[in-house]
Amino acid sequence: MINKALVLTYFYLFIYISLSSGVILYNKWVLSPKYFNFPFPITLTMIHMAFSGIVAFFLIRVFKVVAPVKMTFEIYATCVIPISAFFASSLWFGNTAYLHISVAFIQMLKALMPVATFFMGVMCGTDKPRCDVFLNMVLVSVGVVISSYGEIHFNIVGTVYQVTGILAEALRLVLTQVLLQKKGLTLNPITSLYYIAPCSFVFLFVPWCLLEKPGMEVSQIQFNFWIFFSNALCALALNLSIFLVIGRTGAVTVRVAGVLKDWILIALSTVVFPESTITGLNIIGYAIALCGVVTYNWIKVKDGRAPQLPSDSIPERLTKDWKLEKKPSAIINNDTNVGSNFNSSELNDEEAPLISSSRLSHFGRQLSNSSSQRS
C-alpha cells in the first residue's frame, strides 16, 4: 500500500528542488549578456523585493492568512533594519556574480557558506569553536580552492562578488539569531517577507540610484513585463515551497535535499548554458568540499539528536516527522534541538527573498495537513 504522506513529502521536496534550481537558472538567464541581457542585478533584486512585499501585505492584511507579529519601533530599528541591510547586500552581491561567473562555479563557491556561518557565529558568540568542526571547515576551504584553480573561466571580480555575498548572508544569519531570538521575536516566511522585503527594497534603492539608474537611462534595455513577473513569481513560489518542506521534513532530509539540489543544479547549468564548462579539477575540488559540508551537516544533526533515540532512516524519518506534532522549535538556533538544524545554506536560497523562519506557524501546519488530506 502506498504511503500517501511519504509520497506527498517527496513531492514537496521535488517542488522545492525544482523551484530552487529554476530560480537560480532563471536569474542567470535574465542577467546574462549572452541571453536576455538585463545586466542590472540591483534592479532585478528590487523587483523581487517589491513583488514579495506586496504579496505578503495582501496575505497578512487583506486575506488574513497569517497574523502579523507584535512589532515595536525598537525591535524594527534594532533588528529588522540591520538584518534587512545584510539581506539586501547578500542578494545584491550574489546576483551580480551571475554577470561574471557560471552558475556551476557559483554553486561550488556556495560550499563556503557553512565556513562563513561558523566563523561569524564564533566571532559573535553564537557558536563555540570546536576542533572537529574546524577541521571540516578547512576541508571545505581546500576543496573550494582546488575547484577555483580548476575553473577555466575564472573571474576574480565575480568571485569577489560571490564571496562577499556569502559573508553578508552569514552575517545576516548570525544577526537573525542574536537579535531576533534575544527579543523573542519569531517570523515565518510570510511575515518575514512582510517586514524584511520593504526594508531591503529601501536599502537597495540607494546603490541603484548611484550604480544602475544612470546606465538604464542611456542604454537600450529590454523590459518584458511577463519575464520579470514570472521571475518574481518563481522566487515567491520558492518561499512557499520552503514553508511546506520545513513543515513536513526533518533535518536529515533537508540537508540531503540541499546536497542533491546542488549536484542537480551544477549538471543542469552545463546543459542550459553550454559555455559553462566543468573540468575534472572542478569536480574533484567540489567533491572534497562537499565531503566537508556533509560531515558538518552530520555533526550538527548528531548534536541535535544527542538526547534522543538513534537516527532513523530517511523514509522513516519522513513518516515520523509528518505524524508527530511539530513543536515550535527555534529553527535559527543550530545547537538546541532537531528542529533547529535547518541550516540556511541548504534551504534559504539567497535568490529568494526569505529570512529563516524561527517557528512554524499554525497556518503552515494547517496547509500541510490539508494538502495531505486532499491527496
Image (cartoon, helix red, strand yellow):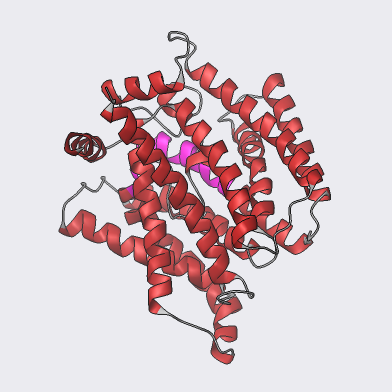
Q: Is residue 297 left or right of residue 289?
A: left
Residue 161 rendering spot, x and y as whole percentages: 68, 59
Most common SS among magenta residues:
helix
**Quarter of the picture holding the N terminus:** top left
Rendered location of residue 220, percent (x, y):
56, 89
Magenta stretch holds residue 169: yes
Q: From which residue to which does the magenta span run? A: 168-189
Which corner quadrant of the image does residue 219 belong to?
bottom right
The answer to whether residue 74 shows anywhere in this view is: no
Left or right relative to 298: residue 146: right
The residue sitting at 44% across, 14% down in the picture is 312
Can residue 243 be seen at all in this image of the molecule? yes
Q: What is the number of callouts on the image?
A: 0
> In the image as oriented, which residue stretches furthest toward the front?
1
* Residue in the image at 48% along x and 57% along y: 23
Q: Report which quarter residue 91 is drawn in.
A: bottom right
Q: From the viewer's side, name the closer residue of 132 and 222.
A: 222
Query: Eyeballing the image, is 328 above or below 313?
Result: below
Query: Residue 88: percent from the left, percent from the top?
Result: 51, 59
Residue drawn at (36%, 62%) of the image: 233
